Image: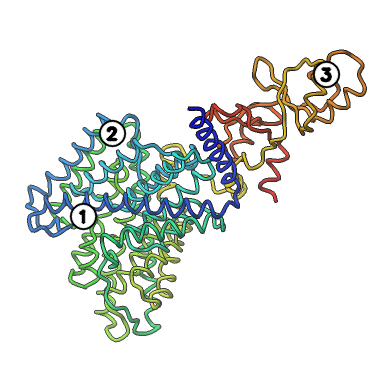
Amino acid sequence: MKTWRKAITKIRNQLHHARIHISHPDALLSLAVLGLITGVVTGSVIVIFRYAVDGLRVLLIPDGQIGHFEALSVEMRLLLPLAGALLIALVFRLIGGKQRVFGVVHVLERLEYHQGRMTLRSLLLQFIGAVTAITSGQSVGREGPGIHLGAASGSLLAQGIGAPNNVVRTLLGCGTAGAIGASFNTPLAGVIFSLEVIMLEYTVSGFIPVVLSAVGATVVSVAFFGIDPAFAVPELQWTSLWEMPFAILVGITVGLASTLLIASTKALAERSQRVPFTLRVVMAGALTGIVAIFYPQVMGIGYDTISQTLAGSIGVGLLVGIAFSKIITTTAAIGLGIPGGIIGPTLVIGAVLGGAMGILGHGIFPTVSSDSGHYAILGMGAMMGATLQAPLAALIAVFELTQNPHIIMPGMLAIVVAGLISGRMFGYRSVFRVLLRARGLDYIQDPVVQAMRRVGVASEMERSFVTTGSVLTREDAAALLQNNPRWVIVTREKQPVSALPALDIERALQISTDPELDLLEVPAKRLSLTGIHMSATVDQALDRLSTAGAEALFLYNANIPALSRVQGIVTREALHSSYRY
């Protein structure tokens, strides 16, 4: 029995030191391994999610063609979204608690206000809610839910091993990249999306784990679904440079559509905050059903519509009708709280708008314009980039989907123009930040704050210390200093209250002849203390010091009762130096 206890204590001590090690921002090897593990876990979750969605849709659609909601009768187009909305409302009423926000918006909220700590409940609710929403034909995509599932997988993995908060944040970003990579077979787009939209930073310590996660998740997805991209993309070859002005025109048109989508979603989200959740989702389902009577292409993910548009098999009138109908139904779904994503709908809207413009352009200038599928691809990238305000992620996604370098130059042009229209001309930021602000929240993009959040406070703690009560005999004080500690932590009623440099106590022993020393009275530099869990980041530590009005922190780890409660001490100067240098 004693041998087992010693072994367990040894393992706990090793884990404790490992957690301190990965709290350093330069613990690259450990973070790389954790990133790869996160990718494999995320890829497995996305595979299960896709099988659940595809399997249920095959059962619901008569001809068995995944995504072809056009095969449904008029009555089913009306009733299926309404029934799905009622089921979502029932599930969330029974087990949802207060959870009502999902997808990328929820991930950003947890990252900004909760150090990236997500819950198993939110993962399960997102899974159930998204499967129900997509299979019942709500106008949402699977990428937003996939990002939620991937981020939650990384966050829960980090929490499960007791990792500090800076690692929780990193693994959340790894899960995000893995989710995008596994959804589209676009690992590089997943990396850029994670860094550009979620993490808001480009650092070596953040980049390498995210890359490994995206690769790991994509490998898992390819093992089950194959290497083919999400859409059937035709061969792309630009006719001449005279098409560049038309690419700009595509960017302008899509930028206006993106502005309309963001503005309408923002207005609806703000005005529906006080409406009961059940009523909101039922309204969204009913509206989708009504619109689907005339345009069934608005239902579900819409990848089949994208493939048909890329192939040029849909006429201009229908394409324009689908675009505006999809904007209406997506606004209702996202603005009213259906647990789905907006990335998929932006790709559909961009594809049909770009395809429509390509058909018109080819009819007017047949000798200098390319096939409409080229412009559909441009529209997809431009709509995604403008709506998410993530131009680089959109460009990389378009490149990986087409696997054609000829798309890069016109793609850059269309994406940048669309982003300028939405982001600068009309002043709209990412749709995710717009939805956060509709809830009275926001997402900070301060580089100094980001730097502080990359560093765990445990990496800066001083572990050369001893603890004692305030009153000591000269003999006890001398014994306390025998091992040359740097700090002496004074406790009152077993609570640390002050820290003194050990040199000051040694000096007091030389000066004073009193038989006892009161460490709270002797001449010394005393730092008032407050406590913080050793999983905190430097950002949290500085906030704690300011809130408590203290001068230094003592770190504790309540998760390991075999170790001393006080694990170390951190001064304000050490915290500042951690991100300055």
Q: Is residue 429 visible?
A: no
Name the residue at 18% across, 47% down.
136
Residue of label 2:
277
Name the residue at 25% across, 53% down.
50
Q: Nearer the viewer, mark 3 or mark 2?
A: 3
- Count of residue discs: 3
Which numbered disc flags the more N-terminal residue, 1 or 2?
2
Identify the disc placed on residue 298.
1
Which structural element holds mark 3? helix
Q: Amino acid at mark 2?
A: Phe
Q: Amino acid at mark 3?
A: Glu
Q: Specify few, some or many for label 2: CA neighbours under 10 Å numbering under 14, 14-19, or 20 or more.
A: some
Q: Specify few, some or many for label 3: CA neighbours under 10 Å numbering under 14, 14-19, or 20 or more.
A: few
Name the residue at 60% across, 52% down.
26
Q: Position of residue 544 (x, y in %)?
A: 62, 31
Q: Specify few, some or many for label 1: CA neighbours under 10 Å numbering under 14, 14-19, or 20 or more.
A: many
Identify the disc placed on residue 475.
3
The foreground one among 258 and 480 is 480
Which numbered disc flags the more N-terminal residue, 3 or 1?
1
Which numbered disc flags the more N-terminal residue, 3 or 2?
2
What is the CA distance from the residue labelled 1 to the residue labelled 2?
A: 23 Å
Q: Quadrant of residue 316?
A: bottom left
